Image: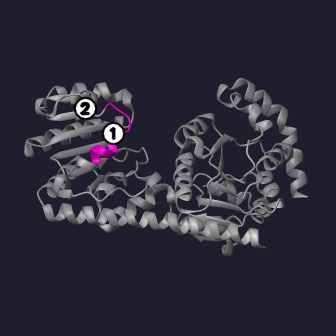
């Protein structure tokens, strides 16, 4: 009954969706592909990974690369909801995966793709509850798993209101590999069987291990990474105070949005010898005599964190929700961050509790704790070692997640 009702509603909504799609360029770009998925060349079976948008796509990239290196699975289809996420994955994964749009949740569209690929399993990154996608895939005898499962604060109430219906969808999901105990409990509260929900940890923070780095080779660099516009006044004030105290240190400032680069450069140039990173990369090292560097390039921040003795990660002193504070820890660099870490709550708590990083409430605390770290080599080393341990734990989270996926697929094929 639930399946019939759902499909009547989806077909009734189709004309309205098509009118909407024609009026929206972003939706119009892949509407034909979503209605009638194209055939996929090759006879090999594929592992199907669904990543809705950019955030899920980055997780899918890490998962696919890890599985290619550590399991027998080599052929992947990745579906996305957005054209931009698809372009990103196609660029990053190249020939290692087929990337296309997720079919609309109509019986015909889903069946067409299933016939094309004969998947080994369907792995849904985080949470995308499309009933026909799940029902029809499971009907083909294909394992269905939600990987890195999460239910956000903004959607949990809505899902609980629909739990009477979601139970019929969840019955065809083999496992939810939840990213925390909190999210495991949320899945159970909306109708998922407790025996099917496992807290495996958050693979969002997984990165391939960096080579061990000798912290004694770190340079006299203080880095402000992923800084946002509403934090600039605090950042400028703390830089001036830190340069008074540590005049031989160079401060690197990397904005989250490049459009504020000029604002940062103008302010720092009024007090310091300042240069853009794009120019610094071209300049002979012997000719460089600077106080501050504005990072105006993409893809260089990790290398700067590697060279730094301490780093502040922005998007956290103002209500932006935070940024990834693990990146400095890959290289044993102590990290500081503000209290607004809603989007990274679990990892922020772990970093603070482990001693790998420090939460600061304002500019005064930021100056105080940066100075404390720079003046205490033993503390700097201790924080760096704690950070490397956290990175090691993220390797274990990915291994555990993939082991469960592989075990479930093998069990499905042997039954």
Q: Residues in magenta?
A: 296-305
Mark 2 — residue?
281
Q: Is residue 134 magenta?
A: no
Query: Is residue 397 left or right of 170 when viewed as pictured?
Result: left
Rendered view: 364 above or below 140: above
Q: Which mark is first along the chain, 2 or 1? A: 2
21 versus 109 height, above or below: above
Q: Secondary structure at mark 2?
A: loop
In the foreground, 188 or 199: 199
Instruction: Name the residue nearer the viewer: 331 or 29.
Output: 331
Q: Which numbered disc covers residue 300?
A: 1
Frontmost residue, 345 versus 330? 330
The residue depicted at 30 percent of the width and 24 percent of the height is 262
Answer above or below: position of 158 versus 393: above
Quadrant including the N terminus:
bottom right
Q: Where residue 380 sits: x, y (%)?
A: 19, 60
Residue at the spot 74% in from the left edge and 42% down from the top edge: 40
Q: Position of residue 378 (x, y in %)?
A: 15, 65
Residue 87 in the image: above or below residue 356:
above
Percent coordinates x, y for residue 62 in the rendering: 51, 52
Residue 173: image quadrant is bottom right
Q: Is residue 301 magenta?
A: yes
User: Which quarter of the figure has residue 281?
Assistant: top left
Mark 1 touches mark 2? (CB < 8 Å): yes
């Amino acid at each position: 009954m639930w399946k019939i009702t759902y499909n009547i509603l989806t077909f009734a909504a189709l004309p309205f969706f098509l009118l909407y799609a024609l009026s929206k360029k972003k939706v119009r770009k892949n509407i034909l592909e979503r209605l009638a998925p194209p055939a996929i060349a090759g006879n090999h079976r594929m592992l199907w990974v669904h990543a809705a948008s950019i955030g899920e796509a980055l997780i899918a990239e890490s998962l696919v690369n890890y599985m290619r290196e550590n399991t027998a699975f080599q052929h992947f289809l990745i579906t996305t909801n957005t054209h931009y996420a698809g372009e990103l994955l196609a660029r990053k994964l190249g020939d290692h995966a087929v990337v296309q749009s997720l079919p609309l949740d109509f019986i015909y569209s889903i069946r067409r793709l299933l016939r094309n690929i004969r998947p080994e399993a369907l792995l849904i990154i985080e949470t995308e509850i499309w009933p026909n996608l799940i029902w029809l895939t499971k009907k083909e005898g294909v394992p269905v798993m939600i990987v890195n499962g999460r239910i956000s604060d903004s959607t949990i109430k809505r899902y609980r209101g629909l739990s009477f219906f979601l139970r019929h969808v969840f019955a065809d999901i083999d496992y939810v590999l939840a990213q925390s105990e909190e999210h495991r409990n949320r899945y159970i509260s909306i109708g998922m069987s407790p025996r099917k929900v496992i807290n495996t940890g958050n693979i969002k923070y997984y990165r391939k291990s960096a080579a061990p780095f000798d912290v004694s080779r770190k340079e006299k660099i203080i880095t402000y990474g992923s800084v946002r516009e509403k934090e600039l006044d605090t950042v400028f004030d703390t830089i001036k105070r830190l340069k008074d105290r540590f005049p031989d240190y160079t401060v690197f400032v990397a904005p989250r949005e490049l459009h504020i680069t000029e604002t940062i450069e103008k302010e720092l140039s009024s007090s310091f010898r300042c240069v853009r990173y794009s120019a610094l990369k071209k300049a002979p090292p012997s000719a460089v005599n600077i106080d501050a560097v504005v990072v105006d390039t993409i893809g260089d921040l990790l290398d700067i964190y590697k060279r730094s003795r301490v780093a502040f990660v922005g998007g956290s002193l103002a209500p932006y929700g935070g940024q990834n504070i693990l990146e400095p820890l890959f290289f044993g660099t102590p990290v500081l961050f503000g209290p607004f870490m809603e989007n990274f709550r679990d990892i922020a708590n772990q970093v603070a509790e482990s001693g790998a990083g420090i939460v600061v409430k304002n500019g005064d605390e930021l100056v105080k704790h940066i100075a404390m770290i720079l003046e205490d080599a033993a503390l700097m080393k201790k924080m760096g070692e704690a950070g490397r341990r956290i990175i090691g734990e993220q390797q274990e989270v990915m291994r555990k997640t993939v082991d469960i996926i592989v075990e479930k697929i093998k069990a499905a094929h042997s039954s």
